[in-house]
Image: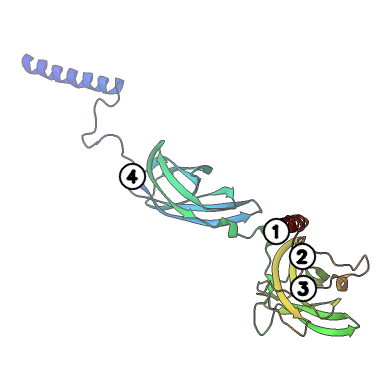
């Protein structure tokens, strides 16, 4: 019996020591089912999309969206770096980093940011995923032709019509007095948007077809044009008769050109022009385009011309040489 008691006491002592060690040093008695630290789940870029944002005269904002696909165990310390690189030079134009945090659910997570770049050329937009500062995935797209984006200040839903049956600019003869012709001009505008038109105006310039001399100009305010409606803006000008003219109409919004149109007015009965013809040789009488100081047209893009004249025949040197030759012949015959 003493021996049994000794063994029992020793077993109790061993258990007590084990419990004391387990309490003093956590983790000594490990769970046999424990596989070690939890391994983070995989993260990949499922999709990247780019859309234009605010557009100014010099820059444009690119709205970039990336969807991260996460599966498995939670993944902590996730971030996405967005970078815009010039497609031609390779220079980095803009960089933004977005902290995502911990991804603990299966599925996709939307990450988005804005990159401001110059409104010209093209860019390579890249999205790179980091986990604890380590790169785990990347992807991107290329955008080009940013110069075609219309700045905010020049946007309008109103523009000149483009139809053979309804020309953008038309004219009719109102009256003819001596060598002056008065024209009624009509510019046709259409609102292609969903709201009423803004504060717009139309300027019309008539240039003599052969000289580019501005013969007349006029301006008219554009009233409110309802969505989907077409309206006509009318004005009147007086120009010298028997000439052909290009009619240039410009649509303005707060000092910004938003649309243009061109037509032709054939007042010369001997020939005709169209908007596709720019060169011909005809007689021009500039005095027909002169008027008062307020009405006198101005020449644009004209070039000075010089004319040189020469007469056929011999010069003075040739005549002297001929006289000397005749004298020598006469002297020889005299001997």
Question: Split into 4 quadrants, where in the image is the C terminus?
Answer: bottom right
Q: Hey, which quadrant is residue 288 in on the image?
A: bottom right
Q: Do the residues labelled 2 and 3 touch (CB within 8 Å)?
A: no
Q: Is label 3 in a helix, a strand or a loop?
A: loop
**Which is closer to the viewer, label 1 or label 4?**
1
- The local secondary structure at tag 1 comes to helix
The percent position of residue 19, horizontal first and vertical second, equals 24, 22
Task: Tell me the distance, in whole angstroms, between the alpha carbons under discs 4 and 2.
Answer: 97 Å
Q: Earlier in the sequence, mark 2 or mark 3?
A: 3
Q: Where is residue 332 in the image (x, y as percent from the top left)?
A: 71, 56
Give the label, 4 or 2, closer to the camera: 2
Horizontally, residue 158 falls left or right of residue 61, namely: right
Residue position marked by numbered label 3 in the rendering:
224
Task: Indicate the position of residue 39 as horizontal and vertical percent values.
Answer: 31, 39
- Check disc 4 and report the residue beneath it: 41
Label 3 neighbour load within 10 Å: few <14, some 14-19, many 20+: few
Residues tagged 3 and 1 counted as in contact (Cβ below 8 A): no
Disc 3 to disc 4, C-alpha distance = 60 Å
User: Is 233 placed above or below 8 here?
Assistant: below
Outermost front residue: 335
- Report if the CB atoms under discs 1 and 4 are less than 8 Å apart: no
Q: Which label is found at residue 153?
A: 1
Q: Can residue 254 be seen in this view?
A: no
Q: Distance between the residues labelled 1 and 2?
A: 63 Å
The residue indicated by pointer 2 is: 311
Q: Distance between the residues labelled 1 and 4?
A: 48 Å
Please state which of the two labelled residues, at mark 2 or mark 3, is closer to the viewer. 2
Q: In this view, does 156 lie above or below 167?
A: above
Of the image marks 1 and 4, the number of the one nearer the N terminus: 4
Upstream in sequence: badge 3 or badge 1: 1
Q: Which of 18 and 167 is in front in this view?
A: 167
């Amino acid at each position: 019996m003493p021996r049994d008691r000794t063994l029992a006491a020793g077993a109790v002592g061993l258990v007590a020591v084990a419990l004391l060690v387990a309490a003093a040093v956590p983790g000594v008695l490990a769970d046999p089912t424990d596989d070690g630290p939890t391994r983070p789940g995989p993260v990949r870029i499922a999709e990247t999309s780019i859309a234009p944002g605010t557009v100014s005269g010099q820059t444009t904002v690119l709205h970039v969206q990336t969807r991260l696909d996460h599966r498995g165990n939670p993944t902590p310390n996730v971030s996405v770096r967005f970078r815009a690189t010039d497609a031609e030079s390779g220079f980095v134009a803009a960089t933004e980093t977005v902290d995502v945090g911990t991804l603990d659910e299966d599925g996709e997570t939307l990450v988005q940011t804005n990159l401001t770049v110059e409104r010209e050329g093209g860019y390579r937009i890249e999205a790179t995923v980091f986990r604890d500062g380590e790169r785990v995935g990347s992807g991107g797209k290329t955008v080009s032709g940013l110069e075609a984006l219309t700045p905010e200040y020049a946007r309008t839903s109103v523009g000149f019509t483009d139809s053979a049956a309804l020309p953008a600019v038309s004219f009719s003869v109102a009256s003819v007095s001596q060598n002056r012709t008065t024209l009624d001009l009509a510019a046709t505008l259409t609102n292609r948007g969903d709201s009423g038109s803004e504060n717009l105006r139309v300027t019309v310039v008539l240039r003599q077809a052969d000289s580019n001399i501005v013969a007349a100009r006029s301006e008219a305010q554009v009233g409110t044009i309802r969505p989907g409606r077409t309206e006509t803006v009318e004005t009147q000008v007086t120009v010298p008769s028997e000439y052909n003219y290009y009619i240039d109409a410009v649509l303005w919004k707060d000092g910004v050109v938003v649309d243009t149109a061109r037509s032709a007015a054939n007042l010369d009965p001997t020939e005709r022009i169209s908007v596709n013809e720019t060169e011909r040789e005809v007689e021009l009488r500039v005095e027909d385009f002169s008027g008062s100081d307020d009405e006198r047209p101005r020449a644009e893009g004209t070039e000075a011309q010089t004319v040189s004249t020469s007469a056929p025949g011999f010069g003075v040197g040739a005549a002297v040489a001929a006289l000397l030759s005749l004298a020598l012949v006469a002297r020889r015959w005299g001997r």
